[in-house]
Amino acid sequence: MSETFPLNGQSILVTRGGEKGLGLANKISQLGGRSYIVPLIDFKANHDPNAVTFLNKLHLYDWIIFTSQNGVQFFFNEVQNIISEIKLADLKTRIAAVGSKTKDAIEKYNVKVDFYPNYFSATDFVNQFIEEKILAKRVLIPKGNLASATIKKGLEAKNILVDEWIVYNTFFPPESKEKLRSLLREKEINYATFTSPSTFHHFMEIVNEHSLENHLKNIRFITIGAVTRKAIENYGYTVAASPEVYTMDSMIDSLCSLTNL
């Protein structure tokens, strides 16, 4: 197999849309693979009637914890839409991020990130946050409607008051349903990539609805994150690779490693 094109001849399903999905698809193409983009999740703002209340009491929180890039984007959209003059840099509230990409997203708003863990999972975040004995009596977590409550539960177990603010909703794009059904029926897919439990739940919704289980026999699943891996395993499937570093680049490296076996 060519070292320059390690994915040559491989057909790979990309289940993320937008710039992230396109970026992953482009890398696959550059490495010789054929990518099929079928976005299985999309995001929209959650219009919480309590948004103004959350923003007006930001100064009461010791920490704001961001668990995803989407959480960052939709949070700052709310800040700009409701209280345009607010500046987090002027508050004593400290900022934490789960993962380097989330940290980068926060810093684009010229906001300093005071803490992020060495490993990028909710469990790792809680463990390191507690181990470093970081002072926190009250925290706010802007998140999506389907995001896990791992951080909330972990901090509450240490008597820290946690408020969760749902700033965006995750949904299954209707136009992707027929696209996925046709793809699984008509194309031979070698690998399918999943970056969240929601992407796989939506994937299996179409598989079960159209009795496409036999079309999955030759597909190897690649994931980012232990939670996503567990979601796939709960359906009875095996995950071929799940890199410890939760990035698209690590996912690509895993794909290349598998095709070289």
Image (cartoon, rainbow, N blue to C red):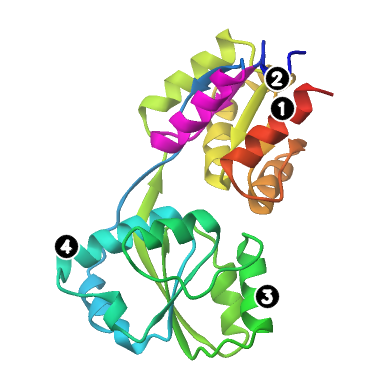
Residue placed furthest toward the right: 261
Residue on which disc 2 sits: 6
Q: Earlier in the sequence, mark 3 or mark 1?
A: 3
In the rendered view, tell whether residue 179 sits above or below residue 40. Answer: above
**What amino acid does circle 4 point to?**
Asn
Residue segment shown in magenta: 11-31
CA separation in Å, label 3 and label 4: 35 Å
Circle 4 SS class: helix
The disc placed on residue 127 is 3
Quadrant position of residue 29: top right
- Position of residue 75 measured from the top left corner of the image (x, y, whole percent): 31, 63
Asked if residue 26 is among those painted magenta in the image, a careful observer would answer yes
Name the one closer to the observer, 228 or 73. 73
Quadrant position of residue 200: top right
- Position of residue 208 measured from the top left corner of the image (x, y, whole percent): 59, 29
| Identity of the residue drawn at 61% across and 20% down | 31
